[in-house]
Amino acid sequence: MDVNLVLVKTDKGLNEIKTRQFKLNSRIRAILIVIDGKTSVGKLISQFSHIDSVEKDITNLITYGFLRIATDFKKQRKDLSRALTDVMGPHADYFTLELEECVNISDLKLFLAEKHDMLERGLGKRGDKFWKMAEHLTD
């Protein structure tokens, strides 16, 4: 497992913390609880160095849907900006400048909703790549 990855809890993981529906053992539950969306896997492994199976436990939490790998927001924003420029050329500057002002996924989704009609007209039939990327934005 890549020690530089950052993990976030899924809805299933958040639900497990609240309800204990899946009755995870205390060791695995403790790992799930400390996942904060900021700490790297490497730091988690060292934090739980007293547990021999910590890397396997983290892998299992991912496999069974309690955790997922955090998405790199800046990369998503850059990819969207590049897709706009590929299709629209310099006419994309207006949109790419506004994209750069988005500081999180929520801002990005709001931007897409507010500019949807303008983007549709600007991208035309060649906007498929852009819209597919926009559909798959994740936190």
Image (tube, rainbow, N blue to C red):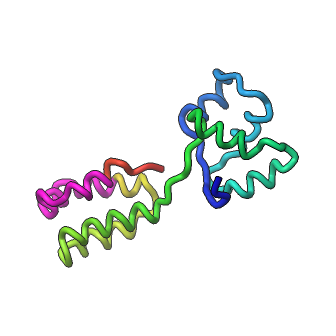
Looking at the image, residue 101 lies above or below residue 90: above
Looking at the image, residue 17 lies above or below residue 104: above
Q: Position of residue 16 (x, y in %)?
A: 64, 28
Q: Is residue 51 left or right of residue 139?
A: right
Q: Is residue 100 left or right of residue 46?
A: left
Front position in the image: 68 or 102: 68
Looking at the image, residue 90 lies above or below residue 47: below
Q: Is residue 4 left or right of residue 121?
A: right
What's the residue at 43%, 54% (across, down)?
A: 105
Q: Is residue 34 left or right of residue 11?
A: right
Q: Within the magenta stretch, is there residue 122?
A: yes
Q: Within the magenta stretch, is there residue 13?
A: no
Instruction: Please identify the residue farthest to the bottom as the structure is shown.
Output: 90
Front position in the image: 56 or 123: 56
| Quarter assignment of residue 67 | top right
What's the residue at 16%, 56% (across, down)?
A: 120
Front position in the image: 52 or 126: 52
Q: Position of residue 53 (x, y in %)?
A: 78, 41
Q: Position of residue 34 (x, y in %)?
A: 72, 45
What's the residue at 61%, 54% (across, down)?
A: 6
Looking at the image, residue 96 lies above or below residue 128: below
Q: Main secondary structure of the magenta part?
A: helix
What's the residue at 87%, 46% (across, down)?
A: 50
Front position in the image: 76 or 60: 60
Which span is picked out in magenta? 110-133
Q: Position of residue 28 (x, y in %)?
A: 74, 35
**How many numbered marks have been drawn onto this rendered protein structure?**
0
Instruction: Please identify the residue farthest to the right as the structure is shown.
Output: 50
